[in-house]
Image: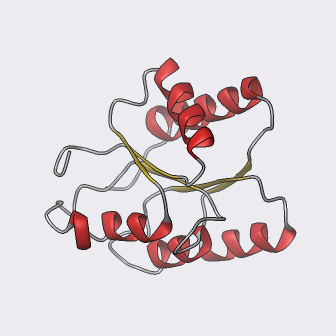
Amino acid sequence: MNNSRVEVLLVEDNLHDAEMTIRALRKVNLANRLIHLKDGAEALDFIFAKGTFAERDVENKPKVILLDIKMPKVDGIEVLRQIKSNDATKTIPVVIMTSSKEEQDIITSYDLGVNSYVVKPVDFEGFAKAVSELGLYWLIINQAAD
């Protein structure tokens, strides 16, 4: 999928949460062009076409990035910082999806330019509904800058 159009970039180290997210997006037919990465370092390599993803067309930007905060190697806050501070990527919508309700995480995320901050619901039904609505909004309703 190196140069195919990517719509959703899911950056989530918790495999259970990633599977639930993918299942919820599949249910509303929004998971066809989804890539799941397990840590922030992989995400940065993908977004900026480095390392394993060096052959990827950097102009092929995801329509939305669903980003967890607490991850190994590089945390979501640093991934967000690098995306939003780069002219080539700063317009990509980024949605923080996390279990963190810490006020400082919320403030820092918005200061860095996050487009939305969502605390993951604990139950599957609430989680699936939240993910479906996010997917529908960011992939169907929202008009993104190209």
Point 59% across, 72% down: residue:
75
Q: Which quadrant: the C terminus?
A: bottom left
Residue 139 in view here? yes
Residue 13's quadrant in the figure?
Answer: bottom right
Whether residue 57 is situated above or below residue 90 in the rendered picture: above
Instruction: Judge whether 3 appears above or below 79 on screen.
Output: above
Query: With 110 as the anchor, is 64 left or right in this view?
Result: left
Residue occupying the point 39% across, 70% down: 44
Q: Is residue 56 left or right of residue 26?
A: left
The residue under the point 24% across, 72% down is 51
Q: Nearer the viewer, residue 115 or 97?
A: 97
Q: Position of residue 52 (x, y in %)?
A: 24, 66
Q: Identify the colour scheme used.
A: secondary structure
The N terminus lies in which quarter of the figure? top left
Q: Is residue 142 above or below residue 88?
A: above
- Res 83 quadrant in image: bottom left
Q: Position of residue 95 (x, y in %)?
A: 59, 54
The reply to whether residue 50 is in sight is: no
Residue pictured at 60% horizontal, 49% vertical: 14
Residue 16, how many percent across, how many down?
61, 39
Q: How many marks?
A: 0
Which one is in front, 15 or 107?
Answer: 15
Residue 4 on image: x %, y %: 19, 44
